Amino acid sequence: MKAEKPLTDKELEEWESSRDLDAELLDSVRQMKAGKGHVAMSYQEQVKRDIEALNKVDKQDNTADMGDYL
Protein backbone atom coordinates (compact mmCIF):
# COMPACT_ATOMS: atom_id res chain seq x y z
CA MET A 1 0.00 0.00 0.00
CA LYS A 2 1.44 3.33 -1.02
CA ALA A 3 1.53 5.98 1.70
CA GLU A 4 -0.16 9.26 0.90
CA LYS A 5 1.42 12.61 1.64
CA PRO A 6 -0.40 14.73 4.21
CA LEU A 7 -2.58 17.50 2.84
CA THR A 8 -1.25 21.02 2.86
CA ASP A 9 -3.09 23.55 4.99
CA LYS A 10 -4.81 24.93 1.91
CA GLU A 11 -5.83 21.47 0.65
CA LEU A 12 -7.13 20.55 4.09
CA GLU A 13 -9.15 23.75 4.31
CA GLU A 14 -10.66 23.11 0.85
CA TRP A 15 -11.52 19.51 1.75
CA GLU A 16 -13.11 20.52 5.07
CA SER A 17 -15.18 23.26 3.43
CA SER A 18 -16.53 20.80 0.85
CA ARG A 19 -17.86 18.36 3.47
CA ASP A 20 -21.53 18.10 4.42
CA LEU A 21 -21.25 17.18 8.09
CA ASP A 22 -25.03 17.05 8.60
CA ALA A 23 -25.35 14.41 5.87
CA GLU A 24 -22.33 12.47 7.15
CA LEU A 25 -23.70 12.37 10.71
CA LEU A 26 -27.19 11.39 9.53
CA ASP A 27 -25.72 8.60 7.42
CA SER A 28 -23.69 7.37 10.40
CA VAL A 29 -26.77 7.28 12.63
CA ARG A 30 -28.73 5.37 10.00
CA GLN A 31 -25.90 2.84 9.66
CA MET A 32 -25.76 2.33 13.44
CA LYS A 33 -29.54 1.88 13.67
CA ALA A 34 -29.37 -0.66 10.84
CA GLY A 35 -26.71 -2.60 12.77
CA LYS A 36 -24.02 -1.88 10.20
CA GLY A 37 -21.71 -0.11 12.63
CA HIS A 38 -19.18 -1.63 14.98
CA VAL A 39 -17.81 -0.73 18.37
CA ALA A 40 -14.19 0.35 18.49
CA MET A 41 -12.98 -0.45 21.97
CA SER A 42 -9.81 0.95 23.45
CA TYR A 43 -7.09 -1.46 24.54
CA GLN A 44 -7.50 -0.42 28.17
CA GLU A 45 -11.25 -1.02 28.08
CA GLN A 46 -10.74 -4.47 26.55
CA VAL A 47 -8.18 -5.40 29.22
CA LYS A 48 -10.58 -4.21 31.93
CA ARG A 49 -13.39 -6.39 30.51
CA ASP A 50 -11.06 -9.38 30.22
CA ILE A 51 -9.98 -9.05 33.86
CA GLU A 52 -13.60 -8.71 34.98
CA ALA A 53 -14.48 -11.87 33.02
CA LEU A 54 -11.57 -13.78 34.59
CA ASN A 55 -12.58 -12.65 38.08
CA LYS A 56 -16.18 -13.75 37.40
CA VAL A 57 -15.05 -17.21 36.24
CA ASP A 58 -12.84 -17.58 39.32
CA LYS A 59 -15.78 -16.85 41.61
CA GLN A 60 -17.91 -19.42 39.77
CA ASP A 61 -15.16 -22.06 40.12
CA ASN A 62 -14.94 -21.64 43.91
CA THR A 63 -11.44 -20.25 43.65
CA ALA A 64 -12.35 -16.97 45.34
CA ASP A 65 -9.80 -17.69 48.06
CA MET A 66 -7.08 -17.06 45.46
CA GLY A 67 -8.07 -13.40 45.16
CA ASP A 68 -8.80 -11.19 42.20
CA TYR A 69 -6.38 -10.62 39.36
CA LEU A 70 -6.34 -6.90 40.02
Image: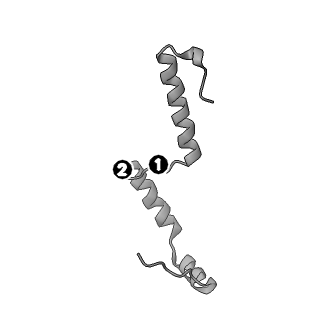
Viewed as shown, does residue 14 lie left or right of 33? right
Instruction: Bin the neighbour count of mark 1 within 10 Å (Cα to Cα): few under 14, some 14-19, many 20 and up.
Output: few
Tell me the residue that label 1 is attached to.
Answer: 39
Residue lying furthest front: 66
Which mark is drawn over residue 5?
A: none
Q: Residue sitting at 60 percent across and 84 percent down?
A: 8
Tally the marks: 2
Quarter placement of the N terminus: bottom left
Which residue corresponds to mark 2?
34
- Labelled pair 2, 1 in contact (Cβ < 8 Å): no
Dot 2 crowding, Cα within 10 Å, few <14, some 14–19, many 20+: few
How far is mark 2 from mark 1, CA to CA? 14 Å
Report the amino acid beneath label 1.
Val
Could you tell me which residue is drawn at 51 percent across and 35 percent down?
50
Asked if 70 appears above or below 16 in the picture, the reply is: above
Place of residue 57 in the rendered image (x, y in percent of width and height, measured from the top left): 48, 23
Q: Residue at x 48, y 78 (%)?
A: 3
**Nearer to me, 27 or 59:** 59
The image quarter containing residue 13 is bottom right
Relative to residue 63, is residue 33 drawn left or right?
left
Nearer the observer, 1 or 17: 1
Residue type at numbered disc 2: Ala
Q: Secondary structure at mark 2?
A: loop
Instruction: Locate residue 56, reporting x and y percent.
Output: 51, 23
1 on left or right of 69 = left
From this view, report whether residue 23 is shown above or below residue 64. Answer: below
The picture places residue 53, in percent across and down from the top left corner, at: 50, 29
Q: Nearer the viewer, mark 2 or mark 1?
A: 1
User: Could you say where residue 35 lies in the image, as x and y percent from the top left?
Assistant: 37, 48
> Which badge, 2 or 1, comes first in the chain's sequence?
2
Question: What is the secondary structure assignment of the residue under circle 1?
Answer: loop
